[in-house]
Image (tube, grey):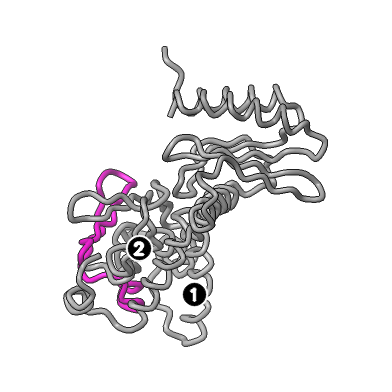
């Protein structure tokens, strides 16, 4: 595991990031969670977060309307979600082909990774972000705007990637 | 033309179900808990079966290690209405089978072994 002080400072973690990532790391090391269960739990969390944003009256007025590029709408919604939850430091969301987009996260800026931040020593991925993003974005947009193409996240060099279909 | 991996897996699972007629449903899942192939009833959420099957086997393996029981060969959960059988398929996958109560366990284990060897060849 990387030096905790370095991770905390470089990734600008708050106490909730530290709690979340280390808590899930512990569960993963006990064999209690995996990417599949993280996906299921992340969907539930998205529903709860939507209710939270609604209760706080801080839902953004970002919707797909005629003439607006749906990828741009999704991009703005992801920007909002990341601003609220402070999930990652650096990322990009861009169209890769007609109807498909990729979320590219600079891995060493992710603040909630149970492996990179929490130090989970397990095989495979434990990323809640793709499922959380899809479900929260779709709830806020009040339509199925994004659909996950991959079931989790793919680690590729310094980046973590998730592919989505962007629907009109 | 070589059949796709999905087709090959489906054929193997189908044969397993045919050879042990009390096997009601089967799935091949990655150790990450993500479904690779499944023959599950439409009312069963395959995402949940995948995630829970992988977690159960993973916890069992950890418990086996902690309690010095050696490598876990299989997990068999007995319910009032039937069994859940979970087995490793090599290093990266697992087999989950939902089985009726009336099954002959010897036959189930024997055919599960055969099924797993075939799955390993494909995966």
x%, y% of residue B20?
72, 26
Point 50% across, 70% down: residue: A45
Please report the residue visible at 58 percent of the width from the left and 36 percent of the height from the top. Answer: B38
- Is residue B118 within the magenta segment? no
Which comes before the other along the chain, label 2 or label 1?
1
Q: Write down the residue under mark 2.
A: A120
Percent of width and height locating residue A86: 31, 76
Asked if the stretch drawn in magenta spans residue A92, the answer is yes
Q: Where does label 1 land, which residue?
A: A50
Residue beneath the point at 81% across and 50% down: B80
Position of B66 relative to B47 (above/below): below
The residue sitting at the bottom extreme is A56
The residue lying furthest to the top in this view is B1
The number of numbered badges drawn on the structure is 2
Quarter of the rendering occupied by the N terminus of chain A:
bottom left
Residue B51 visible in the displayed image:
no
Start-end of magenta stretch: A79-108
* Residue at the (33%, 84%) spot, across then down: A15
Mark closer to the observer (2, 1): 2
Q: Nearer the viewer, residue B72 or B93?
A: B72
**Chain under numbered label 1:** A
Residue B12's image quarter? Answer: top right
Label 2 CA crowd tier, 10 Å (few <14, some 14–19, many 20+): many
Left or right: A125 in relation to B61: left
Question: Which secondary structure, mark 2?
Answer: loop
The verdict on a common chain for dots 2 and 1 is yes
Q: Position of residue A153 (x, y in %)?
A: 34, 53
| Residue toward you, A84 or B118 | B118
Q: Can residue A131 be seen by looking at this rendering?
A: yes
CA gap, disc 2 to disc 1? 28 Å
């Amino acid at each position: 595991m990387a030096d905790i002080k370095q991770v905390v400072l470089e990734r600008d973690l708050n106490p909730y990031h530290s709690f979340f990532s280390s808590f899930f790391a512990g569960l993963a090391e006990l064999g209690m969670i995996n990417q599949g269960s993280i996906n299921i739990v992340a969907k539930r969390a998205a529903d709860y977060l939507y209710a939270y944003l609604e209760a706080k009256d801080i839902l953004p007025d970002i919707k797909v309307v005629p003439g607006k590029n749906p990828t741009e709408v999704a991009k703005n919604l992801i920007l909002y979600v990341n601003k609220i939850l402070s999930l990652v430091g650096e990322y990009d969301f861009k169209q890769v082909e007609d109807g498909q987009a990729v979320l590219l996260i600079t891995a060493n800026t992710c603040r909630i990774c149970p492996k990179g931040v929490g130090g989970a020593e397990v095989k495979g991925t434990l990323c809640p972000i793709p499922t959380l993003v899809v479900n929260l974005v779709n709830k806020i947009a009040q339509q199925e705007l994004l659909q996950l193409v991959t079931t989790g996240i793919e680690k590729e060099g310094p980046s973590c990637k998730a592919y989505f279909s962007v629907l009109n | 033309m070589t059949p796709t991996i999905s087709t090959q897996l489906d054929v193997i699972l189908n044969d397993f179900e045919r050879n042990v007629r009390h096997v009601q449903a089967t799935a091949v899942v990655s150790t990450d808990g993500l479904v690779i192939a499944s023959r599950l009833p439409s009312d069963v959420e395959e995402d949940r079966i995948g995630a829970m099957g992988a977690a159960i086997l993973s916890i069992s393996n950890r418990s086996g290690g902690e309690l010095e029981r050696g490598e876990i060969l299989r997990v068999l959960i007995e319910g009032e209405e039937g069994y859940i059988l979970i087995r490793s398929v090599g290093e990266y996958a697992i087999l989950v089978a939902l089985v009726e109560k009336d099954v002959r366990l010897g036959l189930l284990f024997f055919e599960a072994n055969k099924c797993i060897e075939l799955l390993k060849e494909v995966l």
